[in-house]
């Protein structure tokens, strides 16, 4: 029995066999992981040692309330990472991987040049399940790699990639999901407005750059794609 995506319910593409897509997805996900785990924790740690960091937020943002329930939308980013294997062919999966690597490296350079600190006071919710989740986040992620938000940049990059050929109803769901994710980064006090905006801009710029790169190499017949 074919996967739903293979039957054309979710995408306009005629997809490669799922096994072939899964293999490419796993290989290139590993490559993206090498860049992320090599750069993100290292820069977070380095910034924590710096004596001077920037508060890249507006004073009014500190009045934004913490809404713990939005943590579920925040964590749903990890489900977004699974979506491409169901909606992209092997070529699309490879392109997406390179886009995520570009986003990661570009963000790392900005983290290095603009070491930031979070304006929100990190507080634990009273409800036990939320307290446990926030405790884990606080323990694993220091509040320094902020501008741009990789949470937003990664999610937006993936949605841009899969929405190109997704069916209209799927497209609508993906964009609503992305909007919810972007809101969740602020309403869970993990990011500020500039972080969200810059993450979205970085994603869009990377997408447009890769569009031009692919168009150029397709027309030149280099066989890179």
Image (spheres, grey):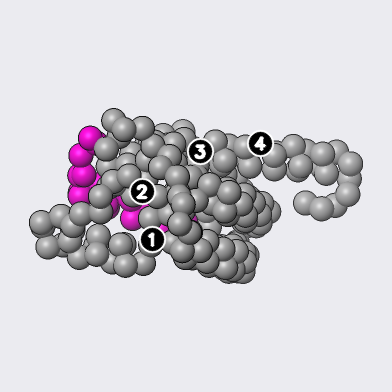
Decide: few, some or many residues near mark 4? Use Cα within 10 Å; few <14, some 14-19, many ≥20.
few
- What residue is drawn where x is 36% and y is 32%? 58
Q: Nearer the viewer, mark 1 or mark 3?
A: 1
Labelled pair 3, 2 in contact (Cβ < 8 Å): no
Q: Main secondary structure of the magenta part?
A: helix
Magenta-colored stretch includes residue 78:
yes
Decide: few, some or many residues near mark 1? Use Cα within 10 Å; few <14, some 14-19, many ≥20.
some
Percent position (x, y) of residue 106?
62, 49
Q: Earlier in the sequence, mark 3 or mark 2?
A: 2
Q: Which mark is residue 142?
A: 1
In this picture, residue 157 sits left or right of residue 53: right
- What residue is drawn where x is 25% and y is 60%? 134
Labelled pair 4, 3 in contact (Cβ < 8 Å): no
Question: How many angstroms separate mark 4 from mark 3 (CA)?
Answer: 15 Å
Q: Nearer the viewer, mark 2 or mark 4?
A: 2
Q: Which residue is mark 2?
A: 118
Question: How many angstroms separate mark 2 from mark 4 (CA)?
Answer: 30 Å
Q: Earlier in the sequence, mark 2 or mark 4?
A: 2
Magenta segment boundaries in residue numbering: 63-81
Taking the image as drawn, is residue 15 in sight? no
Please tell me in which quadrant of the rendered image residue 201 appears: top right
Q: How many marks?
A: 4
Question: How many angstroms separate mark 1 from mark 4 (CA)?
Answer: 31 Å
Q: Which residue is mark 4?
A: 208
Percent position (x, y) of residue 135?
24, 64
- What residue is drawn where x is 66% and y is 54%? 98
Percent position (x, y) of residue 27?
61, 69
Q: Nearer the viewer, mark 3 or mark 2?
A: 2
In this picture, residue 214 sits left or right of residue 187: right
Q: Earlier in the sequence, mark 1 or mark 2?
A: 2
Q: Which residue is mark 3?
A: 198
Decide: few, some or many residues near mark 3? Use Cα within 10 Å; few <14, some 14-19, many ≥20.
some
């Amino acid at each position: 029995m074919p996967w739903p995506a293979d039957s054309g319910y979710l995408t306009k593409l005629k997809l490669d066999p799922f096994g072939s897509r899964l293999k490419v997805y796993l290989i290139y996900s590993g490559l993206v992981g090498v860049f992320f785990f090599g750069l993100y924790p290292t820069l977070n740690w380095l910034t924590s040692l710096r004596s001077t960091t920037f508060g890249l937020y507006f004073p009014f943002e500190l009045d934004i309330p913490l809404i713990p329930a939005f943590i579920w939308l925040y964590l749903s980013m990890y489900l977004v990472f699974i979506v491409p294997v169901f909606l992209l062919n092997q070529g699309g999966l490879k392109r997406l991987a390179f886009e995520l690597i570009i986003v990661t490296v570009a963000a790392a350079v900005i983290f290095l040049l603009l070491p930031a600190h979070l304006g929100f006071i990190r507080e634990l919710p009273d409800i036990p399940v939320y307290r446990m989740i926030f405790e884990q986040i606080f323990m694993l992620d220091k509040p320094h790699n902020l501008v741009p938000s990789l949470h937003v940049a990664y999610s937006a990059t993936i949605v841009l990639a899969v929405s190109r050929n997704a069916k209209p109803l799927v497209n609508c769901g993906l964009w609503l999901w992305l909007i919810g994710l972007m809101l969740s980064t602020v309403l869970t006090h993990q990011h500020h407005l500039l972080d969200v905006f810059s993450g979205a801009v970085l994603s869009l710029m990377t997408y447009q750059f890769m569009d031009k790169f692919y168009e150029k190499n397709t027309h030149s017949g280099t066989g890179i794609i």
